[in-house]
Image (spheres, rainbow, N blue to C red):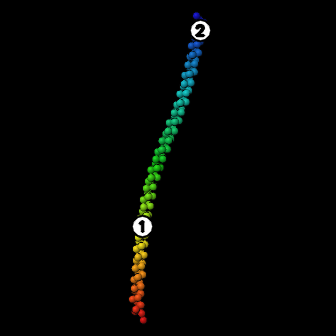
């Protein structure tokens, strides 16, 4: 009977050792899991910051693109106005040439 109790006690001690080892392994795995989760959380935070920077840069690019588009439109309008002005100047130059010829004919009749 005592021998049986001793054997059961030894078996119980062995099971307790196994349980302690299992508990330690579980604690170690939990600590490693916590480290991994913290690293994932840090990576997600970094990605969030990058997304914010990308969104900000995209807004800035959109603003610059709109400004460039407005500038190109203004340049086009100015070029059109310049072309119209040049056409008017050419017409006026031809008119002055014609008047000059008429004046030259008129003046030539008064020569001595």
The part of the image, by quadrant, that contains residue 25 is top right
Q: Earlier in the sequence, mark 1 or mark 2?
A: 2
Circle number at residue 30: none
Quarter of image, res 82? bottom left
Q: Residue at x 59, y 5 (%)?
A: 2
Which residue does the image show at 41% across and 88% down from the upper left?
105
Closer-to-camera residue (32/76):
76
Residue 53 % position (x, y): 48, 46
Residue 80 tag number = 1
The structure residue drawn at horizontal position 53% and vertical position 30%, both measured from the top left corner, is 33
In the rendering, at what x and y percent does residue 5 appear? 57, 7
In this rendering, the answer to whether 46 lies above or below 26 is: below
Relative to 2, residue 107 above or below: below
In terms of secondary structure, where does tag 2 sit? helix
Q: Position of residue 32 (x, y in %)?
A: 55, 30
Quadrant including the C terminus:
bottom left
Crowding at mark 2 (Cα within 10 Å: few <14, some 14-19, many 20+): few
Hey, which residue is sitting farthest bottom in the picture? Answer: 112
In the drawing, does residue 22 fall left or right of residue 86? Answer: right
Categorize mark 1 by other alpha carbons within 10 Å: few (<14), some (14-19), many (20+): few
**Circle 1: element type:** helix
The picture places residue 65, in percent across and down from the top left corner, at 45, 55
Q: Which residue is mark 2?
A: 6
């Amino acid at each position: 009977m005592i021998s049986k109790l001793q054997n059961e006690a030894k078996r119980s001690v062995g099971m307790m050792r196994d349980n302690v080892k299992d508990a330690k392994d579980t604690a170690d795995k939990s600590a490693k899991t916590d480290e991994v989760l913290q690293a994932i959380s840090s990576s997600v935070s970094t990605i969030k910051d990058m997304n914010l920077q990308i969104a900000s840069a995209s807004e800035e690019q959109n603003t610059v693109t709109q400004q460039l588009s407005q500038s190109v439109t203004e340049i086009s309008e100015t070029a059109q106005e310049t072309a119209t002005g040049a056409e008017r100047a050419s017409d006026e130059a031809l008119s002055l040439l014609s008047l000059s010829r008429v004046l030259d004919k008129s003046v030539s009749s008064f020569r001595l």
